[in-house]
Amino acid sequence: MELKNALHSDFEYLHHLKRVRHATARRLRLTVHADHIRLTVPKRCSEQLVKQFLAQSHDWLVQTWQQQTRRSLLNVDDLPKTLHLFNLDEPVAVVLVKMSHTYDYHHQIKVLHLNSQSPFKSLKAFLCAYAREHLPVYLKTVSTQTGLDYQAVQIRYVKTRWGSCNSQHKIMLNVLLVLLQRPHVRYICIHELVHTAVFNHSLVFWEQVAKYDVDYMKHHQVLKKNVWPNWVYIILGRL
């Protein structure tokens, strides 16, 4: 019996196996992605060696592919049906679509199409792109309103902080801010901007924050008690 037929009866991962001959590759290598398995084959490698390599890797492939499948399928019900983004008055509808690329966002009709083969990865990529486009603009607006300047801004996923400001006045904002209500995002921006003038959490610092956000204590408490839905923890790799 041919190797492909023998393995097919055990698991269907070979349907997702993509073989790539690489001129500079020195060894056979398997890489398991969310929607396919890549087999890198050196240019002069024989078919017999490829078959032996796949046979030896079979148990690992089955286990790893099953793990990837569970991540993409078993939690699909946790995906949000809509997204409420901080700078939009209307929610964005989330729709799974079979497509070759990661996502399509239709701003005018407020619809986000996610790749159905890797929906959480697609959603994470969209949120990051959206945050990098809109959070710097919003931070600049708040900076102009308050007269508090900064040197640079970085947008990235962070598991434990909403933002930060270093001694060079470089501000970091968490991608997940785009999922909060606008007043809370404004509070975080003000908080980090005030750090450009007062680099601690002294009474003077909070007095400065209060000048620009009279409800800062309420916003601070809401963010302190924030609990994300499961899908957020999934894209952060915490479930």
Image: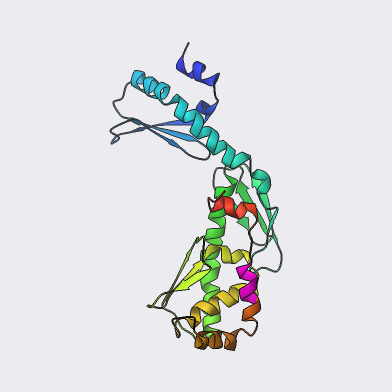
Give the residue drawn at x 45%, y 29%: 60
Q: Residue at x 56, y 56 (%)?
A: 126
Quarter-of-image position of residue 86: bottom right
Main secondary structure of the magenta stretch: helix
Can residue 147 be seen in this snapshot? no
Question: Is residue 106 shown left or right of residue 21?
Answer: right
Q: Nearer the viewer, residue 200 or 174?
A: 200
Q: Residue at x 52, y 40 (%)?
A: 34
- Magenta stretch in the rendered image: 219-225
Percent x, y of residue 100: 55, 42
Q: Relative to 79, say whether 209 is above or below.
A: below
228 versus 134 height, above or below: above
Looking at the image, residue 151 lies above or below residue 54: below
Residue sitting farthest toward the top: 1
Taking the spot 60% from the left edge, 69% from the top edge, the residue there is 224
Vertically, is 174 above or below 57?
A: below
User: Where, by quadrant of the figure, is residue 228 drawn?
Assistant: bottom right
In the image: residue 52, left or right of residue 179: left
User: Would you say 4 lies left or right of 77 here?
Assistant: left
Q: Please check the rendered image and state whether residue 114 is part of the magenta-colored stretch, yes or no.
A: no
Residue 190, percent across and down? 54, 80
State the image coordinates of residue 62 (x, y, percent, origin top left): 50, 28
Q: Relative to the observer, which residue lies in front, 29 or 96? A: 29
Based on the picture, tell me whether residue 222 belongs to the magenta stretch.
Answer: yes
